[in-house]
Image (cartoon, grey):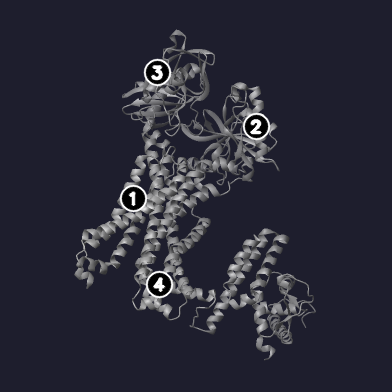
Amino acid sequence: MTGFSVAVYRLLLRLLPRSFRREYGAESVALFRRTVREARQTRGLRRAWTVAVAGWAGVVRGALEEGSELRRQRRGALSGRGHLGATLGATASQACKAVVRAPGLTVGVVALLGLGIGATVTVLSVVDGVLMRALPYPEPERLGVVTQSAHAWPDVLDWRDTVPAFDSLAAASGQVLTLTDEPPQAIAGARVSDGFFEMLGAKVALGRLPTLDEHRQGGRVAVLSHAAWERRWGADPAIVGRTLPVDGHPVEIVGVLSASFVAPHALTGPGVELWVPIDPTDPELDRHDRSFRVVGHLAPGATLEQATEQLRARAEVFARDFPGLYAQDDGSPSRTFPPISLEEATTGDARSPLLILLGGATLLLLVACGNAASLLLARGTARRGELAVRRALGGGRTALLGQLLTESVLLALLAGVVGLGLAAVGVELFRAFEPGELPRVGDVAVDLRVAAAALALSLLTGLVAGLAPAWRASRTAPAAVLRRAETETGSRVARVGSRGLVAAEAALASLLLVGSLTVVRGFSELVTVDPGFTAEGAYAVDINVGRDLPEEQRGAAVERIRDRVSALPGVRAVGAGLSVPFQISGGRRCCWRGELHWNDRELDPLWIHPISAGYFEALGARFRSGRGFAPDDRSDGVSPVILNAAAADELFGSTKALGQTVRFSSEEMRVAGVVEDIRHWGADQPLEPEIYLPYEPMGTWASGLTFAVRAGALPSLEELRTVLAEVVPRAIVSELRPMETVLAESLARQRFYTLVLSVFAGCALVLAGAGLAGTLLYDTRRRRHELGIRVALGAPVAGLVRRVVGRGLGTVGIGGALGLLVFWPLRSHLDTVVPGADPADPWTLLGFGALLLAAALLAAWLPARLVARTDPVRALR
Amino acid sequence: MQPTDHLPLSPRDFLILLVLADGPLHGYGILAAVEERIGDEVPLDPANLYRSLKRLRRDGLVDEAKPPTDEEAPLEQRRYFALTGLGRAVAAAEAARLDRLTQVARLSRLLETGEGVAG
């Protein structure tokens, strides 16, 4: 801290007159350092900062006092050798005048830079809110999440005793619960263990948290999130003490969490509304039920590495004690439970795509900088007369350089204001379009922190955009300009310089363009991936057949619902499963792991889906051989099983699968059909071996099912509720969605990032094209005289046009090649935005070339027209 | 030039003269003495301390003094400053001026007076 504050102090001292610095500068710095250090040692960091800031402020105050003294002494006369404090005001006011004098340029530069800054600040706000801020929990750096998916409740109890690196461990499991009110509503719920709220520092706005006893006895109590309390119950303070029916059981609301408590995304998913204690007396909470995310608080002095070791040791023990659940074939543990920090668990997936967006925005800003620099360069050339006069009258080069840089910084600051405004809109848009998968996106805002970053960014932008133009303009040789005899070489240097700038812009834009094209191509492939079923005409209806229904009656209830819905007009097929494809997220369970045997061959692991008859028909899945389940399948006493193509290929190879007898958990089953692969997990996920078992004889634990319905048109949710109330009175019908919507939503994240990157790339391409057009146009205008002579002497106009166009294409070509060159080593990172995006795809490269060519031709069109219309008489007049 | 020509002094200058009245001090010594006597009431930072010293030297109220020892001291302790005769007179004049002002304030009952202190 001392080093930094002293460096700032030293810098600020330059505001004071040189004579003072010569005499007392070193001593001031030494004294400042000593006071800061002493304050730090004796009174702490906070006090040290106060002292440091007071020291800085003292210098500024001193400089202001000196400045006003100086002005009093020699009013009006301003020497170029004055100290910075006094010249600054004059320079700034001159810069203001210059900016106001050229409103067209000002608007142009401010708009360009504002666009770039706006895009960058928007993404920066998101990055800041999502990735950079500490998690809103006490000691967030000491919280760790036990990974490798979810864990069983007995695991948690074991670790509490055997992993001393964590001084407390808590578990949570997000799941959709149902408020069995009238009408029933789905509510985002989470089951949490004791210690969960305490570890995350949760406070209540009303009432209290569940007590330890309530946790231990699985008390039927719940707390509401603040948002749910406001949205669903209108912030009714009488909610505490009320009893709500949750999944058919009465639950007493004992408290409302404070508004500041944020559900831990990595543990429960976002937006949990109802929190209930885990019921440890529930007999279903055995080692098979792996549904809990586990968070631990590191003991004082303990590290995540120690926790890793201790958890690995337990994994060995688990593998020995429960080989069927925790061991691989060779007896080694199938999972080792490595813990990672809660922060990493929260932001891990979001980091890469967000940083890529930030990179994209920065590229856009740089292209805008390049454009602004071109404009300023042109302006500098136009102002050569003015600058030459000022130099001839004794204006120092440094002063001139400072003046020009001040102008560009002033423009950039204006652009910064515009950019901040754009970013405020941008952040709103981002939050509106973001598909709700980013953690903590609710925290994102353009705040002081971001505004400070925007300010710094603007200053930097001003310097970057203004440096080259200012440098060139300040090098003006006054005599030459005033004689109007600047040499040809001088202007050639300028031309090459501005063309270099355009090439650089083209390179940056190309980088962005090829990146976004790659992503677009990858995305278009995702959209066209065969999901294995026909979404058109299929609907998904979430129906809970009744949690309080005994398991053995659930199969019959499913059949009654199937019969009733089938009887509705227009319905062609109905089937139920734990989920429909592409729907798996949050607390929803689709399936579980298992293994299948055929002769001496084994398929392990594979996914097991329990489904009812009619499921495949309703989804419109295609059979390779055989058929789906029928209600009378078990008439001969052998259960049928259906394999997906991947499972059939892996287990049977070239042997025909249909009719074979396989063994599943010691039961003989007959392969009734092989269905083409269905991408249950999403279009971007790999295919895995899967088998389907009849739902009904499974006596399955889940009562929350999703029914697939194939129909011309489906009745409304209300109608469905009415007709189903006749056959299964306790059934809860909570949601009805077309499968096409389910499919589209599963790609929402990829679509979003693709869209944002494409917008950036489009802007960059337009800016770079405009930059090229501007430069060529300017070039052509300046050479009108020369062109006129050439045409007058008989040079073919077509040749001249070709030269202009060729020059544009050449510049863009060089830039494009450079962009590709830089892009190539970076390309693999795009995989995190859209999996499988491959830039080596010929269509991508072709599209890239075509777009670049089009942009270059479009940019060269205006100047070429200007050349073509050159009238020697007018040009030479 | 009369001592009164230098009046009124800025609080900062006056304080520096006051602490120097006890004997020569280096920059750090002045800061420390000011803080010890009146705390943070008049903010004194390194830059403005030296700016004041520079001006006070120019006006002849303060001069550089010989360090008491020749050994190599930290940079901020190498230069000692002492009151000149004029400086002492100016400080006394400023004190007298402030004292008169304080009397006026007492008479206007702006200041509480301790028993036996006010005449």
Q: CA distance from mark 2 to mark 3?
A: 43 Å
Label 1 environment density (alpha carbons within 10 Å; few <14, some 14–19, many ≥20):
many
Q: Disc 2 or 3, which lies upstream in sequence? A: 2
Identity, as a three-letter code, of the amino acid under mark 3: Gly
Kind of residue sitting beneath label 4? Ala
Q: Amino acid at mark 1?
A: Leu
Image spot of residue A454 (x, y percent):
49, 58
- Please give the label number shown on residue A628: 3
Q: Quadrant of residue A474?
A: bottom left
Placement of A779 over or under A65, stated as above or below: above
For residue A468, what is the image quadrant? bottom left
Picture residue at 71% right of the left edge, 69% below the top: B39
Q: Nearer the viewer, mark 1 or mark 2?
A: 1
Left/right of residue A282 with respect to residue A739 in the rendered view: right
The residue that label 4 is drawn on is A98
Q: What chain does mark 1 sit on?
A: A
In front: label 4 or label 1: 1
Q: Earlier in the sequence, mark 4 or mark 1?
A: 4
Return the x and y of residue B96 as percentages of the image width and height.
72, 85
Q: Which residue is mark 1?
A: A852
Q: Earlier in the sequence, mark 1 or mark 2?
A: 2
Q: Residues within 10 Å of mark 2 (few under 14, many from 20)?
A: some
Q: CA distance from mark 1 to mark 2?
A: 54 Å
